Amino acid sequence: MNKTVTLAMGNGGEENNQLIKKVFYKAFKNDILEKSEDAAILELNQKNIAMSTDSFTVSPIFFPGSDIGKLSICGTCNDLAMMGAKPKYLTVSFVIEEGFLMDDLEKIAKSMEKELEINSTLVVSGDTKVMPKGTVDKIIINTTGIGEVLQNDISSNAISKDDVILVSRDIGSHGAAIFASREGIELESELKSDCTSLFPVVKALLDEGLKITALRDATRGGVSAVLNEWAKQSNVCIEAYEEKIPVSDEVKGICEILGFEPTALANEGTFLIAVNKSKIEQTIKILKRFNKNCSYIADITDKYIGKVVLHNSWGTKRFLESPTGELLPRIC
Amino acid sequence: MSKLELKNLYDDFRDSKTIKSFAKKINEDATKIDRNINIMEVCGGHTHTIMKYGILQLLPENINFIHGPGCPVCIMPKERIDHAYILAQQPDVILVTLGDMIKVPGSHGSLQNARSEGADVRFVYSPLDVLKIAKDNPSKKVIFYAIGFETTTPMSAVLLEKVIKQGIKNVFFHINHVRVPEPMRVLMDDKDCQINAFLGPSHVSAITGSKIYEEFPLTYHTPVVVSGFEPVDVMQSIYMILRQFITGRCEVENEYGRAVTREGNVSAQRLVEKYFDRKDSFRWRGIGDIPKSSLKLRDEYAKYDAEIIYADILPDKKIDDHKLCICGEILKGKAKPMDCKVFGNACKPSSPLGSCMVSSEGACAAYYKYGNIR
């Protein structure tokens, strides 16, 4: 491994997994952690509780469709929701750079407040640190949350050949919006981040009595990272159909210009769901209430165990790998 | 007329019916040719298209692809990557370069490593963003580490022109611009050459025009079809190559008519001519020294040339690749990525030994990423 930590080690893909395995799992090894789920499931007094933490840093901090405040609430609440849990209580820590504008801080707090309401969740403890100018890039927010598990046994390790995979909406708009507004790229676009709280849609799925095999929001590393994690964790082959994966024209366009794949772009309000084959229509019906672009995108087989195969409409196929390294725009 | 949208530039060129019908025609035509046809796609962009869209799965057995040396990052010898690393380590320097270059390991590490050790390394999408970086950091020397074939050279020329016109004093250049025809010639001159036809680069040709390939049918009796980057483009170009063999023609044809003309972008060519001169020789990774195959700033612009200014600290000793790495053979089209002992185990995109695994345009990275399912 490298002598120093590189940006690629925080990409949500392969280098990131290596760092976690080689440094953190080594130090913190335990059965709960090693399940490698979006949130840990803890049994307390015969009740299952979900717990998750996440730190948020994004540039720019205000971006089309959202900001770092909303992101910090959605991110942790979504990780809880992805384990079938109702987000209950959060803690928040701010690390703020000296000289940060008070107006901006208030804007961020306001947008967090709004998102807490959507999740009917409370911030019950917090911490603030201010760092000398130049020692931190504007602001970092950490949130940790606990939630009440509404459906047990949702797991990335449980997917079988009886399941299919669906996506909740068109993919890649958060990653594309951030890239388009980044310094040095600055593409003009109407594109907005998909940043949204996912508990309402998870609740709708559970309220209808749908038995969910696995759920995961496709954040860093995008849809391709989730599919690859699932293929490996559940020891199956995932065969996805390219033309069924919904991508908006704007995201496609930005990918064409910069040389990215939509499946590698981050999302902040888009999730994948694995359900039994017999439940496709029911799932689509519920997902459609929240976003009409939801789609059934993949089947499970045993053809290439641990791998994701992508089929295109003219009958050829290829592997879809987890993204590696930093996302860098193409040269020419 | 309806408004042209971005998707109009690619939707039809990925149309499944069109691709299937070309596949049918190619398979029919291939039976009329009683031999193998080895097509070299010169440009890494085409390697990427061929692997990403599974083109090989659509082709008959007697049509093969040889992956050429047209990836700007893959052909950079280690000693020149070390230049970038050393320049980036200078305390008053901001090193700016394009995309993938950040990831290529030299003998000390990659620019990504240099950055994690404290160096100021930035990538830009447009070289003109260097102007803003220079203005925002007047106390720093901003070195633009320029890479790429004929496609990106005009952008470096425009940057230098703006630097001169705006009287900016803190921008310098490390030039690694290379040319397409010279390595094509070297490959054809090789006694083991297996190439029967070329798929000509898309974006290079938009700048140079298709005329630069006219020597290949004439001197080497090898047809060239300039092709776009989309799957329909590549399928149509393969079909055009086969038609040449069947009808007994051997010429330069242009499939990518929507962007390429015979003459190319003449004003870009003039700009390149104004600021750049041919370098005596450039060492291509895996291929070796090729005379007059790269560019340098003209003598009158020497004061902008970081290679001259920093000559004392920049090593010129040749550094070869890892013993087991066969990038050279792959770049020459003599081996396939799967033939390499370290492919996919010791050498992966997250820990590349050779340059073909680094860039998304490199043959090894494309094979690793998309899998050679045939």
Image: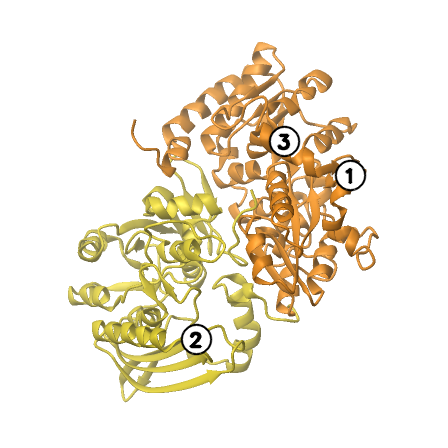
Chain colours: A yellow, B orange
Residue at the image position 61 percent from the left and 42 percent from the top: B363
* In this rendering, position of residue B177 left or right of residue A141: right
State the separation of the CA atoms marked 1 and 3.
17 Å
Q: Give the labeled residue for mark 2.
A: A140
Does any portion of residue B285 appear in the rendered image? no
Q: Nearer the viewer, residue A47 or B1?
A: B1
Bin the neighbour count of mark 1 within 10 Å (Cα to Cα): few under 14, some 14-19, many 20 and up. Answer: some
Q: Give the labeled residue for mark 3.
A: B269
Chain of the residue that carries numbered disc 3 in the rendered image: B
User: Quick check: marks 1 and 3 in contact, CB under 8 Å?
Assistant: no
**x, y (%) of residue B330?**
68, 40
Q: Which mark is residue A106?
A: none
Q: Secondary structure at mark 1?
A: loop
Q: Which mark is residue B279?
A: 1
**x, y (%) of residue B370?**
51, 46
Bin the neighbour count of mark 3 within 10 Å (Cα to Cα): few under 14, some 14-19, many 20 and up. Answer: some
Tell which circle, 1 or 3, labels the residue nearer the N-terminal end.
Answer: 3
Q: Nearer the viewer, residue B253 or A192?
A: A192
Residue at the image position 37 percent from the left and 70 percent from the top: A38
Residue at the image position 32 percent from the left and 54 percent from the top: A165
**Amino acid, disc 3:** Gln
Quadrant location, the N terminus of chain A: bottom right
Chain of the residue that carries numbered disc 1 in the rendered image: B
Q: Mark 1 or mark 3, which is nearer to you?
A: 3
Decide: is A126 above or below A6: below
Chain of the residue that carries numbered disc 2 in the rendered image: A
Q: Mark 2 or mark 3, which is nearer to you?
A: 3
Q: Nearer the viewer, residue A311 or A91?
A: A91
State the separation of the CA atoms marked 1 and 2.
49 Å
Q: Nearer the viewer, residue A287 or A186?
A: A186
**Amino acid, disc 2:** Ile
Do circles 1 and 3 both sit on a common chain? yes
